[in-house]
Amino acid sequence: HREHCLCFTCVLFKPNSPDNCHIAQATFENCVKFDTVTPMWECPEFQEGIPDIAVVSKT
């Protein structure tokens, strides 16, 4: 669902890391808790750039 997730173009996005964006992490935890998928189209903390997401899988 990367095409619907602003996080994948934000430098603060560091999945599987303790330094991950707190908004992205809370959204992820909510999705896991309720078995949902949440698009991220706007974010007050967004910083455009290429995140270091080498640790995230493409599933």
Image (cartoon, rainbow, N blue to C red):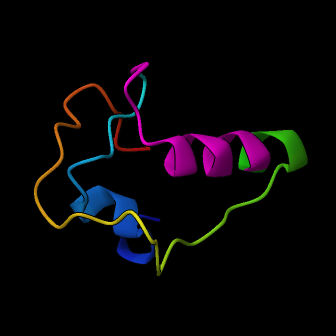
Position of the C terminus by quadrant: top left
Q: Which residues are magenta?
A: 17-30
Please tell me whether residue 1 belongs to the stretch shown in magenta. no
Residue 43 placement (x, y as % from top left)? 46, 72
Residue 48 placement (x, y as % from top left)? 17, 67
> In this view of the protein, which residue sits in the foreground, 35 or 19?
19
Magenta span dominant secondary structure: helix
Q: Residue at x 88, y 49 (%)?
A: 34
Residue 42 placement (x, y as % from top left)? 47, 80
Position of residue 57 relative to residue 48, above or below, is above
Position of residue 42 relative to residue 33, above or below, is below
Q: Residue at x 65, y 52 (%)?
A: 27
Position of residue 16 relative to residue 23, above or below, is above
Q: How many marks?
A: 0
Residue 10 placement (x, y as % from top left)? 25, 58
Tell which residue pokes out farthest to the top in this image: 18
Q: Residue at x 34, y 43 (%)?
A: 58
Residue 24 placement, left or right of 8: right
Please tell me whether residue 21 belongs to the stretch shown in magenta. yes
Residue 29 picture quarter: top right
Q: Residue at x 29, y 46 (%)?
A: 12
Tell which residue pokes out farthest to the left in this image: 50
Residue 24 placement, left or right of 20: right
